[in-house]
Amino acid sequence: MNVLLYYNTYLINMSKESQMRAAINQKLIEMGERERLKELLRAKLIECGWRDQLKALCKDVIKEKGIENVTVEDLVAGVTPKGRALVPDSVKKELLQRIRAFLAQHST
Amino acid sequence: MSPAGCSHVNGFKVDNWKQNLRVIYQCFVWSGSAETRKRKAKSCVCHMCGAHLNRLHSCLHCVFFGCFSKKHIHDHAKNKRHNLAIDLLYGGIYCFVCQDYIYDKDMEQIAKEEQRKAWKLQGIGEKYSMWEPTKRELELLRHNPKRRKITANCTIGLRALSGVLLGSPLSSHSLPVAAPRLDSRRHLAGYEQQDAHEFLIAALDVLHRHCKDDNGKKANNPNHCNCIIDQIFTGGLQSDVTCQVCHGVSTTIDPFWDISLDLPGSSTPFWPLSPGSDGSVVNGDSHPTGATTLTDCLRRFTRPEHLGSSAKIKCSGCHSYQESTKQLTMKRLPIVACFHLKRFEHSAKLRRKITTYVSFPLELDMTPFMASSKESRMNGQYQQPVDSLNNDNKYSLFAVVNHQGTLESGHYTTFIRQHKDQWFKCDDAIITKASIKDVLDSEGYLLFYHKQFLEYE
């Protein structure tokens, strides 16, 4: 019984979190902020050399699979975990700050 | 993976498909207006699990959104036999039959336009893309006699050389460059067919003058203005004339856009090289079959030359005519160095093409041929310390123009390098991938090197 209760609470909290996520996402899209954040992120990732690192990782995947057979899925699977890990903390911090500032400005 | 799209889109491309596709882009991918953004925010969630993340895709055949990562859109595609979906984050079109993203030209065009529209509405700047003139711009270019759009039918070697100047292989449609008009009668010699080297000099000259006109009053020194042509292509060639009697040296520095090198087999003697000049240590030359190398030619170019008793120079130290030696060295190296192998012999005795193979390296160190190196040698330092810190004289090959045929008629082709080691062969409109071996085995007529390391001024 206890376990079920615990699990239920966990699910409720999870769904609350995903609800919140969905709400924030909606707000970001509506106000056009999501596009702006994407562009900011793109610029930051190029600046810090992340894009070049990913390019090299992709080249490795292509060499491995052969250029005739490689699909986008191969690249995504081969590159995503390392790619995420390579994002510098400073970039993450900056994006988070931007989002927080935005939410503070537009809180309902 | 086919870069040209797939046949499975044909089922989609019916009726008013272009407009439908535009609507999908506007509403769900790149929503520019407040209204479309609101709609996107509300409706773009997975119909199976409600998530907005997980690489959401929209079916192209019906109103269905599904996660890609969780395969919800895949299930939909299978069940409904709807083979096409669009990635809502980046606008890519996915074909479930090909099991990969496809790049249909028409659809790509629509995607680009819609993205630009949306970004404009939201105030995000334009992404860089190469300039392709619009119909209106083509009209304007056509009506302006001073400017012309260079098309595929222009002079021989133009495409090849343009590739060199722009640093990338060209596709088969015309060059998006509006250049001041090159009048073949005025700028090039009166041969029926034009020589690539002549064309290069003519083109650089015209562009240089064009830059000077634009700069107006700034150009006070005709030898070295600050235009882009001078910054990239102009080097300084030092000529030292040494009097054999008093050993006084008279030095002049002339600007150059290219270095024309004599070849063995021409009527001017090539061998023997003078002793003491040593380029081979630095460039690691080896002569497996006794083939002439580019550094051999450069050594010959920078060797001290006795001017002989018939060509005495008035020496300002001796105040009389004396025999002298002359030596050329590089005073200042350009960012792009062009070496011209003098394959076309036009002497009084013969007119022919010299087809001697000259081997040239991928990487070239110009240090032994610099004026500064010569000075150190003269001061007694014979062994150049291999100064690995001085990277300023190191060059990399990036383009080779070749000539096939005879003096009377022939054909130019070019090898161009992209990125660090990708080579392409440009033969008029045909661009093919080439190996480094193809490039290095080729005869070589114009060799283009660029500095490996660029310093700030």
Image (spheres, rainbow, N blue to C red):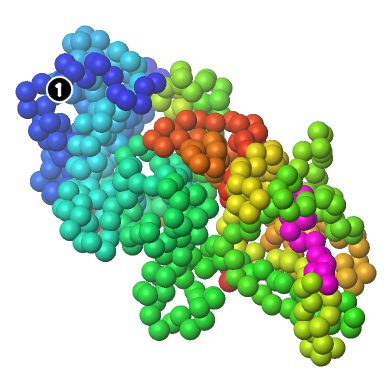
Question: In the figure, is residue B17 to the left or right of B185?
Answer: left
**Chain ID at mark 1:** B
Q: Amino acid at mark 1?
A: Lys
Magenta-drawn stretch contains B299:
yes
Residue, far left: B15
Task: Please tell me which residue is depicted at 55% across the width and 38% down the height of the picture.
Answer: B406
Q: Quadrant of residue B337?
A: bottom right
| Quadrant the N terminus of chain B occupies | top left
Q: Quadrant of residue B314?
A: bottom right
The x, y position of residue B425, in whole percent, is 50, 35
From this view, report whether residue B83 is shown above or below residue B409.
above
Q: Quadrant of residue B16?
A: top left
Residue A55 seen in render: no
Residue, far front: B349
The x, y position of residue B44, in whole percent, is 20, 33
Mark 1 closeness class: few <14, some 14–19, many ≥20 residues within 10 Å:
few
In the foreground, A40 or B403: B403
From this view, report whether residue B28 is shown above or below residue B209.
above
The x, y position of residue B205, in whole percent, is 46, 65
Q: Which residues are magenta?
A: B294-309
In the foreground, B29 or B75: B29
| Quadrant the C terminus of chain B occupies | bottom right
The x, y position of residue B349, in whole percent, is 66, 50
Task: Please tell me which residue is depicted at 65% across the width and 33% down the height of the picture.
Answer: B441
Magenta-drawn stretch contains B145:
no
Q: Secondary structure at mark 1?
A: loop
Residue for badge 1? B13
Question: In the figure, is residue A93 to the left or right of B351?
Answer: left
